Image (cartoon, rainbow, N blue to C red):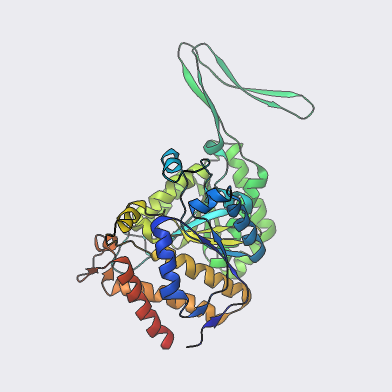
């Protein structure tokens, strides 16, 4: 068949270990037979990041700014053991963190639902997308131990040298600890714009939650900025799209989320989002079925799987052993990026292919053919565990049939 043509390149970012192996197989078996892929390629594998002093990550982020859409393989964020294993020049930063900072983006994580794998929360019928404000708060804190008898104050020095002081606590008769947090209006505004834009792009309600009744300045600032931006820039568009923006306290939001059927975006501050994204991912069944998209406030998108490089499977693969690694989240990263590229370039055939790629992937699982991790979760009466390549081959066969139809 004639392959589907693309106009504008995707920014393709290769990665590490088992996901790098699957990345190439997905392209060969599921993408290139049907799409004349046009990609600007960046190797974010750890050896090449080290070779280029991590300049390749910066170049990839700038390419996303240029072309608007990227798709990324999982990558290693090195620790001391990895520095020794790969003989690195230094302990390079997380590529995701670098790209997120350069794009000023917000990460949206959502589960892939499939028949036979039910969420642990019985009321959940639709995906819940978690949006985390990945800046500031406890992750950029300043903290110290305090000896008994000390008095702690919050001190702000204005540009003219004027000091404003506010007591924190006097540690009479006991040692203690203190912590200082910060955030910026600019970062909160970027977070808000990204959340509103993403909600409009997927036509889903947006929930936002803080604890402004207790944190009457810090958390209330988040609430006020979201409300201001919604009223000024997005209210009319939300109403036209038939979706809503809803604010509530974080504890009320947790209760509502558990009672809900899903189908919305839940925006959280940094720590809340860190915790709740893992809760949502686990409750839906498998991190291997969790997608992630980074959205910048000026409308750039980067798609990837939410999981890591599957190191344990990679060591077995290198030893010549068979592996049954789940590629679904990586497949959906490609389909998401292709669909967004199709939307921006007005290519309905490419969008249709992205839909069929996802349909074929889920249909294979629903037919009872799946990787070992899903066999342990599936309630289907008949199911068969296959290795990674057999799983991709089954999807390729189903995709070929769908494209032929």
Front in this rendered view, residue 90 or 405? 90
Measuring from the top left, give residue 261's x and y in whole percent.
39, 61
Instruction: Return the residue found at the far right.
Output: 160
Front in this rendered view, residue 93 or 195? 93
Measuring from the top left, give residue 300's x and y in whole percent.
62, 61
Q: Is residue 202 left or right of residue 160?
A: left
Front in this rendered view, residue 334 or 241? 334
Visible residue check, residue 47: yes
Front in this rendered view, residue 123 or 22? 22
Residue at image point 53% right, 38% down: 139
Q: Is residue 294 left or right of residue 359?
A: right
- Image label count: 0
208 vs 383: above or below: above
Residue at image point 32% right, 76% down: 394
Instruction: Return the residue found at the far left.
Output: 381
| Quarter in which the C terminus is drawn | bottom left
- Residue 33: name its quadrant: bottom left
Residue at image point 55% right, 40% down: 212
168 vs 186: above or below: above
Measuring from the top left, give residue 51's x and y in whole percent.
55, 50
Measuring from the top left, give residue 250's x and y in whole percent.
48, 45
Visible residue check, residue 363: no
Q: Is residue 24 left or right of residue 60?
A: left
- Residue 181: name its quadrant: top right
């Amino acid at each position: 068949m004639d392959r589907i043509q693309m106009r504008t390149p995707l920014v393709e970012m290769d990665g590490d270990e088992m996901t790098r192996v699957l990345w190439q197989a997905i392209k060969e078996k599921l993408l290139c037979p049907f799409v004349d892929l046009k990609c600007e390629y960046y190797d974010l594998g750890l050896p090449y990041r080290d070779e280029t002093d991590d300049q390749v990550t910066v170049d990839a982020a700038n390419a996303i700014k240029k072309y608007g859409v990227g798709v990324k393989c999982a990558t290693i964020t090195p620790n001391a053991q990895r520095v020794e294993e790969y003989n690195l020049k230094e302990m390079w930063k997380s590529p995701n963190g670098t790209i997120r900072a350069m794009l000023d983006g917000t990460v949206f994580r959502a589960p892939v639902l499939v028949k036979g794998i039910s969420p642990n929360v019985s009321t959940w019928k639709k995906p819940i997308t978690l949006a985390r404000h990945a800046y500031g708060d406890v992750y950029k804190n300043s903290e110290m131990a305090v000896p008994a008898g000390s008095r702690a104050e919050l001190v702000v020095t204005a540009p003219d040298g004027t000091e404003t002081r506010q007591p924190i606590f006097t540690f009479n008769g006991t040692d203690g600890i203190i912590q200082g947090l910060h955030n910026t209006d600019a970062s909160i505004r970027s977070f808000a714009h990204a959340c509103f834009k993403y909600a409009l792009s997927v036509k889903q309600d947006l929930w936002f939650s803080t604890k402004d009744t207790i944190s009457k300045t810090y958390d209330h600032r988040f609430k006020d900025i979201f409300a201001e931006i919604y009223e000024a820039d997005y209210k009319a568009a939300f109403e036209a799209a038939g979706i809503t923006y809803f604010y509530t306290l974080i504890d009320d939001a947790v209760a509502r989320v558990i009672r809900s059927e899903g189908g919305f975006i839940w925006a959280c501050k940094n720590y809340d989002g860190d915790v709740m994204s893992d809760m949502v991912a686990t409750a839906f069944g498998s991190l291997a079925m969790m997608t992630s998209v980074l959205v910048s406030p000026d409308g750039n998108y980067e798609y990837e799987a939410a999981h890591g490089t599957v190191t344990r499977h990679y060591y077995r693969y290198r030893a010549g052993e068979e592996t049954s690694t789940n590629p679904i989240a990586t497949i959906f990263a490609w389909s998401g990026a292709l669909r967004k590229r199709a939307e921006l370039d007005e290519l309905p055939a490419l969008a249709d292919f992205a839909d069929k790629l996802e349909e074929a992937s889920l249909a294979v699982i629903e037919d009872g053919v799946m990787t070992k991790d899903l066999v342990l979760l599936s309630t289907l009466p008949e199911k068969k565990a296959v290795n990674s390549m057999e799983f991709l081959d089954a999807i390729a066969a189903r995709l070929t049939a769908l494209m032929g139809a």
